[in-house]
Amino acid sequence: MIFVWSLLAGVILFSVYAVIPTYYNKKINPNIIRHAQGKDTIMLTFDDGPDERYTGKLLDILKENGIKATFFVVADNVRKYPQMVDRMMAEGHCIGIHSYCHKNAWLKTPREEKRDFENSIDLLESYNWKTPFYRPPWGHTNLLSMYYAKKHGFQVMLWSVMAQDWSSKSSKETIIKKLLERTREHSIICLHDAGENSGGAKDAPLNTIEALKTVIPILKQKGYRFVTPEVAQYEAV
């Protein structure tokens, strides 16, 4: 009986600390950015990089198509490949923080959550980079995530379109199909420019890269404008 009550208490505490905040922030919190605002606007975002195997190829495609994107970078990957972030910024893209080591907020203690924000900020500032944008890994938050985001002046940005491009089961064709079917005016598209080092499948970004060669021109042909946070207004809905 003691075990049952202990288990129940654990479930309740975990729900209060992690599950309920995540649901609230994903679905209800009016301060979360979930959609781009403005006529014919969409936003292309990438999580988990930079990665020297894939990020440069994505930047090449964006440059060829004359569009800007937002990269939510993992600070530990920035430490390995700072030149990639230099290129992002030199070519007019936006960066945001995506945690220090891509650990799920549900698994972080309060102290770990505090240090994650601080370490991420310290690393970016050591390169003289700053950003007001933050995206939690998997979109998961805990009871303290929004407190630290606000304390450090971050706007939290989620997404409205995914194509499961991190999965080994996602081919170039399935990514193309999902992106074209799901993207609408005001969409924030979330894709990934890192593989197994951040929880995705090895070489999964190669399918994303190939898919974007088809998808970007089609979306442009439909009249969508690709925007970044610095040049767009957002609707928190």
Image: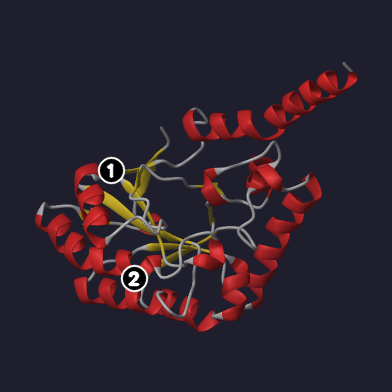
Disc 1 and disc 2: Cα gap in Å? Answer: 26 Å
Instruction: Report the residue at 42% width, 58% height from top.
Output: 166
In this view, the residue in front, 215 or 31, is 215
Q: Please say whether residue 48 is visible from this viewpoint.
A: yes
Instruction: Report the residue at 62% width, 28% height from top.
Output: 20
Q: Which amino acid is tagged 1? A: His
Name the quarter where the N terminus is drawn: top right
Q: Eyeballing the image, is 62 above or below 199?
A: below
Q: Please say whether residue 184 is visible from this viewpoint.
A: no
Q: Is residue 110 left or right of residue 49?
A: right
Looking at the rendering, which quadrant does residue 39 occupy? Answer: top left
Residue 9 % position (x, y): 80, 23
Q: Is residue 192 left or right of residue 161?
A: right
Secondary structure of residue under mark 1:
loop
Q: Residue furthest bottom?
A: 83
- The image's mark for residue 206 is 2
Looking at the rendering, which quadrant does residue 65 occupy? Answer: bottom left
The chosen color scheme is secondary structure
Residue 158 % position (x, y): 46, 45
Residue 16 % position (x, y): 70, 27
Q: Which amino acid is tagged 2? A: Leu
The residue labelled by disc 1 is 186
Instruction: Report the residue at 50% width, 83% height from top.
Output: 83
Q: Earlier in the sequence, mark 1 or mark 2?
A: 1
> 10 Å neighbourhood of mark 1: few (<14), some, or many (≥20)?
many
Q: Is residue 33 left or right of residue 180?
A: right
Residue 93 % position (x, y): 38, 68
